Amino acid sequence: MENSYRYEAAVLGDGPAALFAGYLLKKNRIRFVILDEVNPGNQISDSVQKLTDDGQKSVQIFEDDISQEGKNFVQDVYRRLAFQVGIHENHLFDPNEEEMARFRTLLAAELQGELRERKKVINIVAQNGFVLLKCADQVLDADVLISQENIIRAGYSAQLIMEKKQAHLEEYMRRLRIRQGKRTLRKMVYVTHSKSWFYAREVVMQFAVKRGVAPVNPFMTYGFYMNGKVERDEVIECCHQLIRTSDELWVFGPVSEAILTDIAVAVMEGKEVHFFSISENASEIRELQLEDIIFEREVHAGQIKKSDLLNFVRCTTPRKLDYVQMSLFD
């Protein structure tokens, strides 16, 4: 018996344009599947053949429907990735073969799991408003088939899927009278402090919220190691996972051994680390310079010099180029 799976989108091929579309779909949490290119010898229905051949008509529809914000988003993401792989500015929208290969390699690394699970299709049939995908041992169906060869146009296709899904969900929310909160995009920040300041956890959260970020505090999430209900190492693993998913790490008060471990995780993940004083009153908390950081006694127990600790911490802080004089050794 054939199995059936439903996807919001199917991406045809594994070229740079297809993978760029897949990258955007993944970032927007759209359920999609990557398909192998259909061999010319395989039978494809006329309607789908027209979709894959007559790209201009489909592109015009996408360019008419997608919002200007969506277009800007797609182009901004592409520019960032193009800069990351070293595509020359003059080649931005027409990269050479070497630049295109680097771009594809980057996207393939981002979509390793999806590429491993890609499906080899025998036939594609468009019917009843969706695309039926016949594979060797299963039948898949998708709402949309993305098959553009142009990178930006493929990105528009992916972004339009997200916009239509968002509009669909908002319509349902209006029908169900579900109130929507403000869509302010806050930076997610992992806030950490010594266990000796456990009682100030809410003050730290208050300070961070007032600074316009969305804070995550391990003492608010797990209490004091969940009062021994699970192994301490398991709680620490969960905390480190939260650091990896956060945008930045904020350290409050004296640096303990546990906080040094948090900083090390942030360094490995390329996160910015900022340091603050700590107080029972949020209005008294101030951002610290590196020289003002205090280390707890347990950190110095191994006869570690403060200068060595500062050099380690210094690796985590963003360099302010407006006032830092760089030397030949920077």
Image: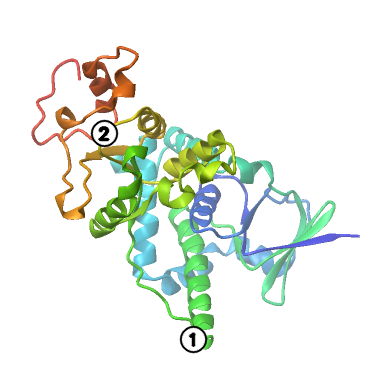
Front residue of 94/327: it is 327
Residue denoted by label 2: 254
Q: At which x and y percent is residue 320? A: 16, 35
Task: Name the image quarter holding the C terminus.
Answer: top left
Front residue of 242/46: it is 242
Residue at 33%, 48% (x, y): give it. 199
Tell me if mark 2 has few (under 14), some (14-19) or many (20+) residues whose alpha carbon lies within 10 angstroms of its own.
Answer: some
Residue at 72%, 49% (x, y): give it. 119
- Residue type, label 2: Pro
Q: Is residue 52 visible?
A: yes
Front residue of 304/86: it is 304
Compared to 264, does 17 lie above or below?
A: below
Label count reads 2
Residue denoted by label 1: 177
Q: At which x and y percent is residue 139? A: 80, 60
- Residue type, label 1: Arg
Residue at 53%, 36% (x, y): give it. 232
Q: Is residue 149 visible?
A: no
